Amino acid sequence: MSDTAPHPIPMVDLTAQYPLIRGAIDDGLAAALDEARFILGPGVQAFEAEAADYLGCAHAVGVASGTDALHLALLGAGVGPGDEVITTPFSFIATAEAICYVGARPVFADIDPQTFNLDPDAVAAAIGPRTRAIVPVHLFGQPADMPRLQALATHHGLQLIEDCAQSFGAAIDDDMTGSRGVTGAFSFFPSKNLGGYGDGGLVTTQDEAIARELRALRNHGSHRRYYHDRIGYNSRLDELQAVILRAKLPHIDHFNDGRRRVAHRYSEGLAGRPGLVTPHEDGIGRHVYHQYTLLCDDQAGRDALMERLAAEHIASAVYYPVPLHRQAAFGGAEPVHTMNRNGPGCPVADSTAARCLSLPMYPEMPDADIERVIDVIRR
Ligand SMILES: *Cc1c(COP(=O)(O)O)cnc(C)c1O
């Protein structure tokens, strides 16, 4: 070994998969520029058809971002003012923001301490007369407990809207995430499992009428140019992003297998370390490891581990340091509606936010880098 500092290990290296898809991207972009149909052009239409086919959904509607996908998915499912929507406090803020956009109120149900996904018992305890919908997030790429959430939704007549921003390609049995709910919302933010080279999103549904509604909502409430049936939005998937996504889609299973390879090597190398819990695969579905997230004994241990990794030029990140019910945007802890299986509050989300740490994770991560991360943590 030389005495120079070891190379930095980033959370994600988006350049690593470019060589594999460069030819398809170059050809696709050149064709799109020649064609010059930049708004809802042939690339968007083709990507929607290919994504719907891959996801096992009758319809897929490309939109401008994952946040917009959630917003339009909620509108398409008929959620609106006066409704309560049960969701997880342990997610990116967009999940709950979108609920607010449609005039509904988020109700935060606590999470499972092992998977960090919604605890169905907490959801059951949170259901009240105004509850209209449940929005599970397939967090870090692991499918939420859809069988139990579907049973609750059916029993209480609620809409189930899946936040699939982190779970493209994750499945329960043969059903992809996004195919069981009334709608599913995907993000193509560059670092997601299927990422564009800019913003993008997708809404899936099996329902023809909802798909038609979504196509109008993303395009100024219009089915026919300059005839507007309702107030809609300007939220279309960009044609050039569709070219990038079409180039990547045929490789998504391979990319997700790469993530699982990294995750399983981490878990092998870190098994049995005192003070550390490696991610739990609950077997409900196939985990596609958008993130690989450890749980430390306490916040001091987590912060010390993060510093130790940084000193060795290894990135790590806390997803998420402040649970949504504690965010200033929702008024802080007091006025926010929260529930766990025994009563108000989300103690598991609070404790998880204080103790979680995500490690570098991307499909092409070199073995030597994985071993270096493991070595530093084991020391
Ligand atoms: C990334 C993400 C979103 C938002 O997607 P954007 O494309 O960034 O708008 C929503 N929910 C979750 C869980 C996410 O991880």
Image (tube, rainbow, N blue to C red):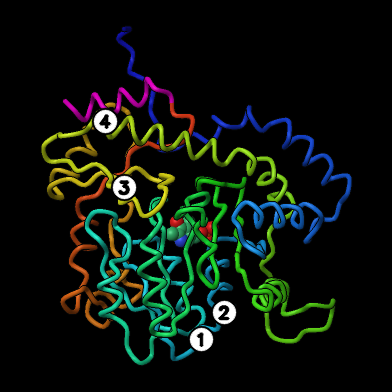
Pointer 1 with pointer 2, Cβ within 8 A: yes
Dominant SS of magenta comes to: helix
* The quarter of the displayed image where residue 52 is located: bottom right
What is the distance, in whole Å, between disc 3 and disc 1 at their CAs?
A: 35 Å
- The residue where tag 2 is placed is 75
Q: Which residue occupies the foreground of this view, 303 or 284? A: 284
**Mark seen at residue 281:** 3
Real-space CA distance between mark 4 and mark 3, rounded to the nearest whole angstrom? 14 Å
Residue 122 falls in which quadrant of the image? bottom left
The disc placed on residue 268 is: 4
Front-most of residues 217 and 233: 217
Amino acid of disc 4: Glu
Q: Are marks 4 and 3 in contact (CB under 8 Å)?
A: no
Decide which of tag 1 and tag 4 comes sooner along the chain: 1
Q: Sequence order check: which comes first, mark 2 or mark 3?
A: 2
Q: Of discs 4 and 2, which sits in the foreground?
A: 4
**Residue 106 appears at what percent x and percent y?**
38, 78
Residue at the far top: name it: 1
104 relative position to 271: left or right: right
Disc 1 and disc 4: Cα gap in Å?
A: 46 Å
Of the 4 image quadrants, the one containing the N terminus is top left
Q: CA distance from mark 1 to mark 2?
A: 7 Å
**Region of the chain picked out in magenta, as a range:** 366-379
> Label for residue 80?
1
In this rendering, which labeled residue sits more in front, label 2 or label 3? 3
Q: Is residue 364 left or right of residue 32?
A: left
- Report the residue at 31% width, 23% height from top: 371
